Image: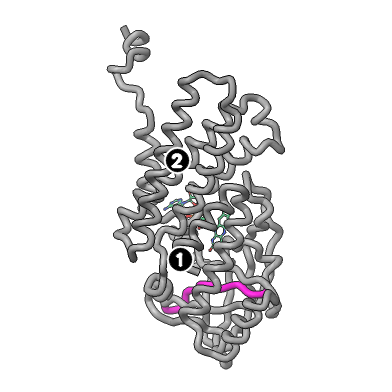
Amino acid sequence: MAAMTLHRRYEQVAACCLTTALAWTQRDAAVGLLQSCAATLAISKVLHALAQGRGWATIGISQLTTSTQHQHQPAVVASRSAAGWTLDGRIPWVTGANESRWIVVGAKTTDRQELLVLLPTSLKGVMPGTPPPMAALNGSKTCAVRLKGVEVPQSLVLLGPCSHVLAARDAVRRFSLTTCVLPLGVAAGAISAARLVLSGRSAQCRQSVETLRTEYKHLARSVYRRGSGGKLPLSEAATMRAKANLLAFRSSLMCLELSKGRGFVMGNAAQRRVREAMFCCVWSSNAHVIEETVRQLALAAPVTPEDPVERRITS
Ligand SMILES: Cc1cc2nc3c(=O)[nH]c(=O)nc-3n(C[C@H](O)[C@H](O)[C@H](O)COP(=O)(O)OP(=O)(O)OC[C@H]3O[C@@H](n4cnc5c(N)ncnc54)[C@H](O)[C@@H]3O)c2cc1C
């Protein structure tokens, strides 16, 4: 499937159910890494099983990218063993860990190099935890996975040890803005829902929803155009992601405002969309994305001394 089509489908699924979209992207990320790194028979067999739907794969790499980076000790340590590597530590986040047959895991070696392995969850010492209650996406059953003396044979090493194992993924990536597509989906779902509850509302409300819809269309167009054009500079990717995050927030809050008290009741989709938008802020956000999202949040509708209400208060 063309990368653009696949990402439009992620977005469409996210517009209805972000939990399903997350689980799907994590599986695809695992498969993508297997395809780009794998050469061993053991890994080809796993890819074959996945293609036939015999088991689910997921990914636990945030300890190399966006989680636990400020800690002195690596979250997952790999030490050489007779047959390959021994893994110890804790993978902080794995979507669907308890339901998965395999996890693609990133680790740091004792000399601080990186290693990427395929971890069958049936191996001795792999201990997925109980998923903690979260603000949203509880159906993703995301949890930490403890690793205690897990023996991984060399045939399951995907890449490394080397200084940056995920560079291999970047090299074969066909779409560079995957993490923008899920917030776009949240925004699209919220805007559609907002339009459905508009009847009988003021012209101003209708116009505001249309303004946001136009903004969504512009952003979606540039995400798909730029995302398919190869790797972007970090700062540009971060700006796009921050815009998508904020659009998800503003759209879902608009939908909640229009849905009124009924929308605040658990079970109503309006409040769920606001909680889903919160996930967009914490998922796979590197330092550039955080900095840019916080910067744009600080800019949103600033109250200045020129503001008429502020002028009345201070005079
Ligand atoms: C629902 C869900 C599903 C996910 N699924 C996956 C998945 O399938 N695979 C995967 O690889 N990842 C997954 N992630 C991980 C995600 O992509 C991010 O890596 C994660 O949200 C980062 O948050 P953290 O709390 O671990 O970050 P950390 O950076 O570890 O922060 C932990 C705490 O430390 C604080 N802190 C951070 N830096 C500093 C500092 N310098 N000094 C002092 N304090 C600091 C933070 O404020 C925070 O409170 C998932 C996350 C969520 C929420």
Picture residue at 63% right of the left edge, 66% below the top = 145
Identify the magenta region: 101-112
Picture residue at 70% right of the left edge, 66% below the top = 98
Picture residue at 62% right of the left edge, 77% below the top = 51
> Camera-side residue: 6 or 145?
6
Q: Is residue 27 above or below residue 251?
A: below
Residue 181 visible? The answer is yes
Where the C terminus falls, by quadrant?
A: top left
Is residue 76 magenta-colored? no
Q: Is residue 298 above or below residue 203?
A: below
What secondary structure is found at the residue carrying circle 1? helix
Identify residue for label 1.
3
Q: Is residue 60 above or below residue 79?
A: above
> Camera-side residue: 120 or 233?
233
Identify residue for label 2.
247
Q: Position of residue 76 (x, y in %)?
A: 53, 71
Is residue 109 magenta-colored? yes
How dense is the environment of label 2, judged by Cα within 10 Å: few (below 14), some, or many (20 and up)?
many
Report whether the residue tagged 2 is closer than 8 Å to ligand 1.
Answer: no
How dense is the environment of label 1, judged by Cα within 10 Å: few (below 14), some, or many (20 and up)?
some
